[in-house]
Amino acid sequence: MGAMAGLSTAEEFLEFFGVSYDQAVVNVNRLHILKRFNQYIARDKVPEVLDEESAKKAFKTLLERAYQDFVRSNAATEKVFRVFQQAAGVGEVSAESLRLSLRPRRAKSEDRTDTAPNSSQGRVRAAVE
């Protein structure tokens, strides 16, 4: 939907889609509402084959849901942004990032076994360092 590309503020989105809103709620949660709206769009994929009116209706539904999340709740509870998730102890770590983080440690421990204090090379290194 090309018309959305020119919108930038929460108020512009809410007005474009005809969503009634309380300015006090938007003042406190504007970025959270837009972020949640973006999450809903990513999760609930609006089909590209819809005509303009149907697409606008689908996006309006997602924006209303995002806005209502913050009418009923608050930013700290909803934890839309990573900083709130991390503060609550919620985090995501991929198996690949764990695997990569262990490689340097393995290499260091292998270096230590190669230069054990019993070997003359290890004593020379220790004396030089």
Image (tube, rainbow, N blue to C red):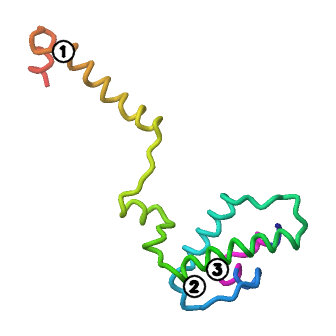
Say whether disc 1 or disc 3 marks the residue closer to the N-terminus: 3
Q: Is residue 114 left or right of residue 65?
A: left
Residue 6, label in figure: none
Disc number lying in front (1 or 2): 2
In which quarter of the view is residue 126 placed?
top left
Question: Residue reaching furthest right?
Answer: 51
Residue 57 at what x, y percent from top left? 80, 74
Residue 95's place in the image compared with 79, above or below, is: above
Structural distance between the alpha carbons of marks 3 and 2 = 7 Å
Which span of residues is magenta-colored? 4-13
In the rendered image, which residue does mark 2 sit on? 26
| Amino acid at pointer 3 | Ala
User: Which residue lies at the image location 25% right of the left edge and 19% below the top edge?
Assistant: 111
- The residue that label 1 is drawn on is 115
> As shown in the figure, which amino acid type bears the numbered disc 1?
Thr
Q: Position of residue 53 (x, y in %)?
A: 88, 73
Residue found at x 73% / y 58%:
45
Above or below for 35 versus 72: above
Report the predominant secondary structure element of the magenta stretch: helix
Q: Position of residue 95 (x, y in %)?
A: 46, 36
Q: Is residue 76 above or below residue 111?
A: below
Residue for badge 3: 10
Crowding around mark 2 (Cα neighbors within 10 Å: few <14, some 14 to 19, many 20+) is some
Q: Which image quadrant: the C terminus?
A: top left
